[in-house]
Image: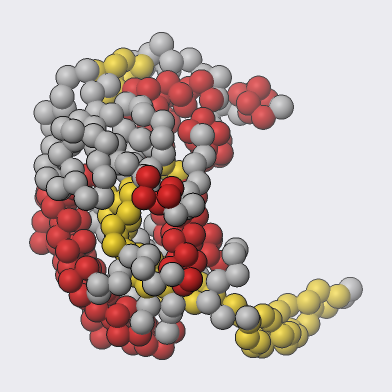
Amino acid sequence: MVGREKELKIRFVPGRCELVEEDVDIPSRRVFVTGATGLLGRAVFKEFNENNWNAVGCGYRRAQPRFEQINLLDSIAVHDIIHDFQPHVIVHCAAERRPDVVESQPDAASQLNVAASGNLAKEAAGVGAFLIYISTDYVFDGTSPPYKESDIPNPLNLYGKTKLEGEKAVLENNEGAAVLRIPILYGEVERLEESAVTVMFDKVQFSNKSANMDHWQQRFPTNVKDVAAVCRQLAEKRMLDPSVKGTFHWSGNEQMTKYEMACAIADAFNLPSSHLRPITDCPVVGALRPRNAQLDCSRLEMLGIGQRTPFRAGIKESLWPFLVDKRWRQTVFH
């Protein structure tokens, strides 16, 4: 079902342009996406918007003009937009997701990852919205993978601890909510630093200088488009079945260290990789990381939910705009 509303559009005719009013269809299913300016949030917003949902996104520093500018720590502002929009689904992507930043700014990270999440869950319950809270594989210590949703978390760093506390705050304030744990993400970035995967591209491209790459931590790089599809599928499943709630896991299924990801990136673009050096020692700088926090995704798979993009295909699509040597584009795409 859809509604109708008026929209102003510019029409170009020979010699002039006109401002005209046209009827547009507004989908009746409404979704509210937090962190819509971020890597995952953009993909989630796009996925719903392109699949017959009326999507509204919010951000903070980068929000306007496309998205609503909302400080999620402002409980009144959050209450007002939720009650005005009356969403059926809320996907909560906003978070401080950088482990080293969380360690250096623990109070601010806790406010966003825990307090704001609990408040959003309460507001979602107030309007009967299904909340999907995005969490992380870092709630596990990485000693006995793969991890099911029922396995006991044991986060090694403050980031994992704040996200686990956020999970608890969400489920305590909204028993019908869902927690979706995901691993390291990549996708169509606006800048390479947006993802711990894509940030390696310059080290791969500039082969005149050797680069040390972690070859200790086992990761499962996951495309944000796939996570976005899972969020939409989960939301649509829930609208048909109220028992769809609780904790879920989703992840890519290709196990790689960062060194192996960097080599795969080089291979995808026909670039040399001999300058990349694998470092097999446990990292001693920064927040502690789990060795292997592989997620068991069988609960979602049993529901018929899921989408996986092969890493080489996904990373090529994500990184080609940042390719420095334009000559390589001839060999990669022609």
Task: Depth check: give the residue in front, 250 or 100.
Answer: 250
Q: Residue furthest top?
A: 274
Task: Depth check: give the residue in front, 133 or 99.
Answer: 133
Left or right? Give the position of 49 relative to 140: right
Name the residue rendered at 60%, 70% in the picture: 52
- Indicate whether 83 appears above or below 310: below
The answer to whether residue 184 shows anywhere in this view is: yes
Name the residue rendered at 36%, 45% in the picture: 297
The answer to whether residue 45 shows anywhere in this view is: no
Dividing the picture into quarters, in which one does residue 32 lie?
Answer: bottom left
Name the residue rendered at 56%, 80% in the picture: 28
Dividing the picture into quarters, in which one does residue 22 lie?
Answer: bottom right
Residue 70, position as x, y percentages in the image: 34, 75
| Image quarter hosting the C terminus | top right
Name the residue rendered at 25%, 41% in the picture: 147
Q: Residue furthest right?
A: 14
